[in-house]
Image (cartoon, rainbow, N blue to C red):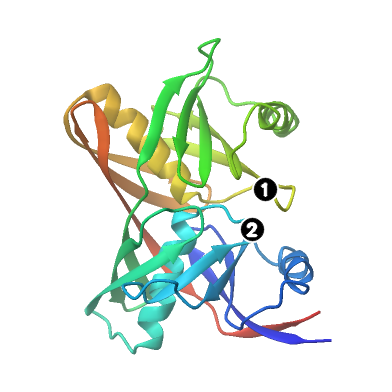
Amino acid sequence: MKTYRYVTLDPTGNITCLVLDAVTAEDKPRVTAALMERCEQVGYLEKPRTAEARARLTMMGGEFCGNASMGTAAWLAREDGLAPGEKAGIQLEVSGAENVLKCRITAEKDGFTGEVGMPRALSVERNADGSMTEVRMEGITHLIRTGGELTAKEAEALLLRETEKTEADALGLLQWDREKRFMRPLVWVRKTGTLVWETGCGSGTAAIGAAEALENGNGTTVTEVNQPGGRAEVKVTVKDGRAAEILLKGTVRIREEETVTV
């Protein structure tokens, strides 16, 4: 049996276990399964493949996650000794994202605030029957559904049906109440086969921000997105009819380091 160190991150309620030690390919499925009993998703801290990145974050299914990226950058900033009021710029490689992500972290008295430059939205379009908006991003695709909220059973059945139509690494169903600015995210990850009701979803926040901004046309739109785990904000700049820049803003709390043995 082997023991691995991990830290639990809370970026806007999206509880993430970040494994700090190098994990063998053989052990990874067991580590993921064990930690999924304690969090919503698992990420692995690895050595970067490019000189410009400080570290690499590989998510449990090779998908992309904005909240985990923000949380990882905050943990690295804490390890650097960032004091309250100080800021740090940290660049990360993240699974599912083609380019290095730029993160800006500010230390607060009770945690961190962060801003992450998100991967671009590859496409934003209504699905065939007009019931949902599909936002395809690097590493994950989201389906935005407005109108009355589905029951958990209905939402899970809907998302599982939609997984049969996509080749994405991960697929999210975002139930979006525009009046209340409230999103309830459900995320499926292909590699692990997990279906999780998340308390926060960074890429989902970015997807909603991109869809809202494109409706508004060229210029910059700031969208507040309330989620079960708290509030996040996304700023999207639209140029020539496409979302040219997406910035996710949120908060991060970090728990003490623990271990898992598999």
Residue 94: x and y, percent? Answer: 46, 61
Closer to us: 72 or 166: 166
Location of the C terminus (image quadrant):
bottom right
Q: Residue drawn 68% across and 46% down? A: 190
Q: Does the CB distance between marks 2 and 1 fall below 8 Å?
A: yes
Q: Residues within 10 Å of mark 1 (few under 14, many from 20)?
A: some
Q: Residues within 10 Å of mark 2 (few under 14, many from 20)?
A: many
Residue picked out by circle 2? 40
Residue in the image at 17% along x and 28% along y: 218
Counting residues from the N terminus, which is met first, the one under dot 2 or under dot 1? 2
Distance, label 2 to label 1, CA atoms, is 7 Å
Residue 259 picture quarter: bottom right
- Amino acid on which disc 1 is placed: Val
- What type is the residue that disc 2 sits on? Glu
The answer to whether residue 214 is left or right of residue 219 is right
Measured along the vertical axis of the image, is residue 182 above or below residue 124? below
Tell me which corner region of the image, top left, top right, bottom left or bottom right, holds residue 167. top right
Q: Which residue is mark 1?
A: 196
Q: Position of residue 204 (x, y in %)?
A: 47, 42
Farthest residue to the top: give it: 129
Q: Secondary structure at mark 1?
A: strand
Q: Residue furthest left?
A: 219
Q: Is 217 above or below relative to 197?
A: above
Q: Quick check: 29 above or below 169? A: below
